[in-house]
């Protein structure tokens, strides 16, 4: 089922009630988080690398036109053919035309967020071309007719048992939840597809202006097969993928795998510069690189939103985000979920279609802490919130409608009034502590005996899905007064 960003609140509520989903997410995100931390600690100059990476991205984005021209000129010199696509429709049109002109019936695909963004599979299908995902996670969700729920681990939300059931149903194998056996099954199916495919379609991790090279990272070897076995290779890249120099790759190769999976380096790094030089060489006869804008130049134009284009799609902010950890990727209704998705989705697909997403954050800053390119996601979220509020204010004034968030506004005004009056603040703490006495057990207010949660609707939203820590018996002010007199 494909969910929409417009119904984020309802999607999130449904996800919170899915215990299996939350269990799978907890396991996967905490493992990724732990591995990332260990991998980052293995480098003494981690912080320095983050600063360098951001500086490289900032420099590139500031002169993007120049670096794109340099990249495309060098790629063409090496034998690649460049195509520019203003939006998803144009990119799909170009790829489908290339496929039709070559009489293609079957395309193998490597994992690529950009192809998900433009819904390429549906476009190919409409043109009578079968598109097979070859990354194991992508293959699983394609079999399940679902969308990816994580930038680097598309099937993160699925348990081993669910995958076993899916393989039995779709591939007709005997039921087994042995991971090795399931992987062998997928490999056997996909090998035949690689051999028969007319077209190989991939994304791009980095495009080097200096040499016209594209770099694609992976762990399964499927990208190697996708980009070298079919006669034609089509690579789709957003305009932000370009970096100036070959030497810059060293910085990103240290940061991206460590931040994504906690690996020091991915198992494969494919550096592709043009087409093969001799007939006997391995590789496709043709390389087509589609350079996609799709609203990115609008993001580039604003100094605040520009930094979102520095994203290298490592997924670390998803794993660190307390919201993503609870609801997973599908609730965002976008190919880009989590904190960076909440920033990118409204800008790519329109504020009105994803207006709830920038509010899906506690602004705790965990995403900013882990981001290898130091993107200030909370700043971007606040920027988008202000923009959304401004737009809805104008709309409300025009239609003389009362803002649907009036209750929230009143609650925050009350909160501000209490916070500004020390005596009132102290009194409210005492009232809360008195009320919580009937609800707290063993150091937590839980749903099972959530009297407070049931009686007070704003708190019920919290205790409905997790425990609430009671307010300490002694406030900081009381402690301070006591300590001063001791
Ligand atoms: S915003 Fe940063 S942490 Fe999140 S996916 Fe992009 S690069 Fe990774």
Image (tube, grey):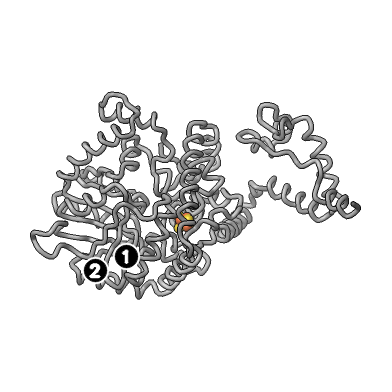
Q: In the rendered image of this protein, does residue 29 appear above or below residue 173? A: below
Q: Is residue 166 above or below residue 480?
A: above
Question: Relative to 228, is 420 on the left or the right?
Answer: right
Badge 2 crowding class, 10 Å Cα cut-off, few under 14, some 14 to 19, many 20 or more, is many
Residue 62 seen by the camera: yes
Q: Quadrant of residue 256?
A: bottom left
Where does label 2 land, which residue? Answer: 75
- Percent of width and height locating residue 187: 24, 39
Query: Which residue is under mark 1?
Result: 207
Which of the pair 457/232 is nearer the observer? 232
Q: Is residue 350 visible?
A: no
Q: Position of residue 174 (x, y in %)?
A: 27, 24
- Identify the element where label 2 is drawn: helix
Determine whether, in the image, residue 225 is placed left or right of residue 443.
left
Taking the spot 41% from the left edge, 49% from the top edge, the residue there is 261
Question: Which residue lies at the image location 21% right of the left edge and 45% below the top edge?
Answer: 129
Q: Quadrant of the N terminus?
A: top left
Residue plotted at (73% across, 29% down): 451
Classify 140 as above or below 56: above
Are circles 2 and 1 on residues that touch, CB within 8 Å? yes
In the depicted structure, whether residue 303 falls above or below residue 138: below
**Considering depth in this image, is 452 or 163 the residue closer to the camera?**
163
Of 232 and 125, nearer the camera is 232
> Mark 2 or 1 closer to N-term?
2
């Amino acid at each position: 089922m494909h969910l929409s960003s417009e119904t984020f609140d309802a999607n999130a509520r449904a996800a919170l009630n899915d215990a299996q989903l939350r269990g799978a997410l907890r396991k996967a995100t905490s493992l990724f988080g732990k591995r990332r931390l260990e991998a980052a600690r293995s480098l003494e100059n981690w912080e320095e690398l983050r600063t360098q990476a951001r500086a490289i991205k900032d420099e590139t984005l500031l002169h993007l036109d120049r670096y794109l021209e340099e990249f495309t000129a060098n790629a063409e010199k090496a034998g690649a053919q460049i195509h520019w696509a203003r939006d998803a429709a144009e990119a799909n049109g170009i790829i489908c035309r290339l496929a039709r002109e070559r009489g293609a019936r079957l395309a193998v695909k490597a994992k690529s967020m950009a192809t998900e963004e433009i819904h390429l599979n549906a476009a190919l299908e409409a043109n009578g071309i079968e598109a097979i995902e070859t990354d194991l996670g992508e293959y699983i969700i394609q079999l399940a007719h679902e969308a990816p729920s994580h930038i680097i681990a598309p099937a993160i939300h699925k348990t081993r048992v669910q995958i076993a059931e899916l393989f039995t149903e779709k591939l007709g194998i005997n039921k087994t939840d042995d991971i090795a056996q399931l992987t062998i099954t997928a490999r056997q199916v996909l090998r035949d597809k690689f051999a028969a495919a007319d077209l190989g379609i991939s994304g791009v991790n980095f495009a080097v202006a200096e040499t016209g090279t594209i770099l694609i990272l992976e762990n399964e070897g499927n990208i190697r097969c996708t980009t070298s076995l079919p006669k034609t290779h089509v690579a789709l890249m957003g305009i932000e993928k370009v970096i100036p120099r070959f030497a810059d790759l060293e910085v990103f190769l240290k940061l991206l795998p460590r931040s994504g999976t906690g690996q020091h380096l991915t198992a494969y790094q494919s550096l592709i510069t043009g087409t093969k030089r001799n007939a006997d060489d391995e590789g496709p006869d043709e390389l087509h690189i589609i350079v996609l804008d799709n609203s990115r130049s609008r993001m580039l134009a604003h100094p605040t939103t520009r930094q979102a284009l520095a994203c290298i799609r490592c997924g670390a902010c998803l794993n660190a985000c307390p919201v993503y950890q609870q609801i997973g990727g599908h609730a965002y209704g976008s190919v880009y979920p989590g904190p960076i998705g909440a920033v990118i989705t409204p800008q790519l697909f329109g504020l009105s279609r994803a207006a709830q997403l920038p509010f899906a954050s506690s602004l705790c800053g965990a995403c900013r802490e882990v981001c290898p390119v130091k993107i200030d996601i909370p700043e971007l979220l606040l920027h988008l919130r202000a923009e959304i509020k401004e737009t809805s204010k104008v709309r409300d004034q025009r239609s003389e409608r009362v803002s649907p968030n009036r209750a929230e506004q009143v609650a925050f005004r009350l909160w501000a009034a209490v916070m500004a009056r020390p005596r009132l603040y102290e009194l409210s703490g005492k009232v809360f502590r008195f009320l919580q006495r009937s609800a707290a057990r063993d150091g937590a207010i839980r749903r099972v005996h959530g009297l407070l949660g049931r009686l007070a609707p704003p708190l019920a939203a919290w205790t409905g899905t997790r425990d609430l820590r009671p307010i300490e018996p002694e406030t900081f002010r009381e402690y301070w007064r006591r300590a001063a007199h001791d």
